[in-house]
Image: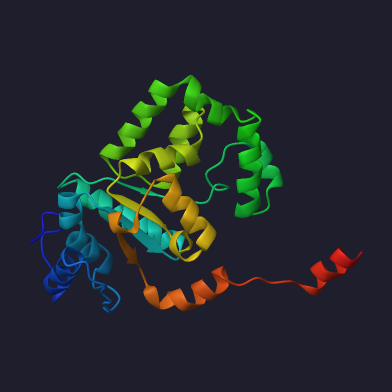
Amino acid sequence: MSEYFPYQSLRPNQEDFIKLVDNAVRNGENLVIEAPTGFGKTISVLAGALPYAKEMGYKIVYLARTHKQMDRVIEELKAISSKTHVSGVEFRSRKELCLHQYVQNFAPDAYNAMIVCKNLKKLGKCEFFENLKRKKEEFDELAQYFVQKPAEPMTILTHSKMLDFCPYELTRKIAFNSDVIVASYLYMINPAIRENFMAYFDFDYSDLIVIFDEAHNLPNQAINALSDRLSVYSINRAIK
């Protein structure tokens, strides 16, 4: 049984699943696996991918469609960490991980939040970002604390509030030293988000083991991510 499988017993065929994943990552292969609800796919994928990832220094990028699915990965990582040390962090949008009232009140979506955030930082008008430099040692200690054991985004947000740090930047800092980064599909299927993500961490694709959870959702998600929409209302406003 894998040292990264935290439970007392395996379900039927779970060991074969783990071996398939382990073999695929060691050989640099693509793998598609289908299994029924309740099989334990999340923990099986992690137990299969983590040994080689840890051994060779690869970063696992675990992508899911919903926050609930992303939270589930963190739950399993916490279970693993009670047996074997493993680190992981869950990404959320900049708007969800922002304490600045201007972003909260006037940025209607993630894209606008990103633009407003960049301008506030450039102008030195975000105290939470400025505190990363003012209290660098304290910030580094907090990031190291969260590398010791995976935590949900809300836990990171709570600690950031207490110390007046930017939760988004803290999440990114934790990710540098985490074994697993959990994020939405958009981090790989949206070109702009993907390029920014890869550049920020200086990743090469050969550094990563990429997992798509519930991959049957991918076609629709990719179509939505790569499509633009214009409403009649928007066109009328533009004409006016």
Of all residues shown, which one is farthest toward the right?
A: 240
The answer to whether residue 90 of the structure is visible from this angle is yes
Q: Is residue 140 left or right of residue 31?
A: right
Image quadrant in which you'd find residue 142: top left
Residue 121 or residue 138, whichever sits in front: 121
Report x, y in % for residue 191: 51, 62
Q: Is residue 84 left or right of residue 71?
A: left
Identify whether 72 is placed above or below 226: above
Report x, y in % for residue 35: 26, 78
Image quadrant in which you'd find residue 68: bottom left
Residue at the (36%, 50%) spot, across then down: 203
Q: Quadrant of the C terminus?
A: bottom right
Residue at the (41%, 27%) spot, across then down: 139
Identify whether 172 is placed above or below 186: above
Report x, y in % for residue 57: 21, 49
Report x, y in % for residue 201: 39, 46
Identify whether 79 is placed above or below 16: above
The answer to whether residue 11 of the structure is visible from this angle is no
Q: Is residue 109 left or right of residue 193?
A: right
Residue 84 or residue 61, whichever sits in front: 61
Residue 9 or residue 200, whichever sits in front: 200
Of all residues shown, which one is farthest toward the left?
A: 1
Residue at the (87%, 69%) spot, across then down: 236
Q: Quadrant of the N terminus?
A: bottom left
